[in-house]
Amino acid sequence: MKKLIYLFLFVSFVSFSQGYDRTKYKTARKTSNQAYKKLLNEDYYGAIALYNKVIESYGAIFQLQKAYENRGKAKFELEDYKGAAADFTECIKLEKTENPILFNLPYPADIKQTNLMIVGEAEDIVEFYLKRGYSKYKLGDKKGACEDARKVQEFRNEFPNEIDITGFLSQYSVAQRHLDLIESACKTVDLAQEICEQPALDFERVERGEITAETIATCANFWGMRGQAALKISNYRGALEFFTKAMDYKVDFELAYVGRGQAKFYLKDYYGAIGDYTKAIDIYIANDKYNSPYLSNAYFYRGYSKGMLEDSNGACKDILRAKELGFKHEKMQSTIDIVCK
């Protein structure tokens, strides 16, 4: 195991030396130091701007992981959870590439006793998983949050006395609350998955009493939330799958139709999007839900989809109806000007 570590360090040194450019390195280090000072002074936007420069301009010759890590921390503080999750994911990927041994749990006893550096590295990984997990939780991705929380616990089990999460967030109660929220999500996910990942239309389950009105509502919401979480991270094909599963439990699930329509829209399946938006609109109108913001959303994006298919008349009617219902969008007026002329 030690020989592997020494070999890795030697290869890393050789690779760095071969790609070394002293002038660029100095510039990158200076920019990174300026970014770190802004991070310490809680100028998060300034820090992000400088770390962007480090990553985009000097990524090949500087410590990318540290830049992603600190940019992720800045985004986390600004509650840009999507951006933070993406940056912490990059940190984890880079750590796995540079130090794959660290992810081979459990560690042999001799490694833990003789290699003090491994504790510090493991602490970094725990912070990445903790903050990424909480970011996923805030984005509604409870399953992803749960998986990251379990990774946190795996590493903490290796070093129960050495790894302290209090330094990762402003105070222990906050850090612990983050973990408690995520672990609560784990219980919800585990319970829902046990029931909801089985076929929805299984008559034997109905006879056994497993499929009840409460179960149907739970599973529809479970898959609907996973669909919404997938949309937030631009996983449109995943969103399609999850919203479709939600409909298996609730065929008139209007939110699932809006969400699946949104996924199809971004995948440029405009005919499919129009079909889902139309179904959602019909359900909202049938249930007299004219005040729902999702109804106006469905009208706007159905109109936009029609416009993409050169149905200007249909597009104009839908977008004007969305405006009547109070829908707001930065492209509202410009779209009306184009399709309603």
Image: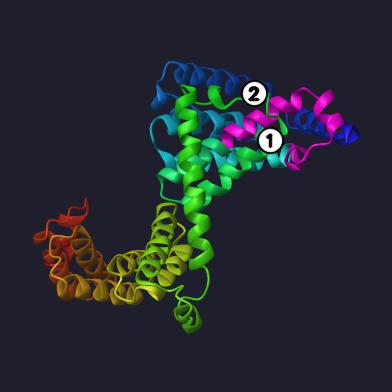
Q: Which residues are magenta?
A: 99-128
Which quadrant is home to the N terminus? Answer: top right
Q: Residue at x 56, y 31 (%)?
A: 69
Of residues 59 and 317, the one nearer the viewer is: 317
Name the amino acid, label 2.
Tyr
Q: Position of residue 239 (x, y in %)?
A: 43, 63
x 12%, y 65%: residue: 290
List the residue tagged with mark 1: 157
Q: Secondary structure at mark 1?
A: helix
Residue 290 as seen in the image, left or right of residue 53: left
Q: Is residue 258 magenta?
A: no
- Picture coordinates of residue 319, whole percent (x, y): 16, 65
Numbered disc in front, either 1 or 2: 1
Q: Is residue 277 left or right of residue 121?
A: left
Tag 2 residue = 25
Q: Residues within 10 Å of mark 2 (few under 14, many from 20)?
A: some
Indicate the position of residue 157 as horizontal and vertical percent values. 68, 35
Residue type marked 1:
Asn
Q: Residue furthest left?
A: 324
**Coloring basis for residues:** rainbow
What residue is shown at x 23% (from left), y 61% (from top)? 294
Question: Which of the two labelled residues, at mark 1 and mark 2, occupies the earlier sequence position?
Answer: 2
Residue at the bottom extreme of this rendering:
203
Q: Give the secondary structure at mark 2.
A: helix
Q: Nearer the viewer, residue 332 or 223?
A: 223
Instruction: Decide: is 122 above or below 215.
Output: above
Looking at the picture, how far across and down is residue 89, in whole percent?
57, 43
Is 118 contained in the magenta span?
A: yes
- Quadrant assignment for the C terminus: bottom left
Q: Pointer 1 and pointer 2: residues touching (CB < 8 Å)?
A: no
Graded by Cα atoms within 10 Å as few (under 14), some (14 to 19) or many (20 or more), the crowding at tag 1 reads few
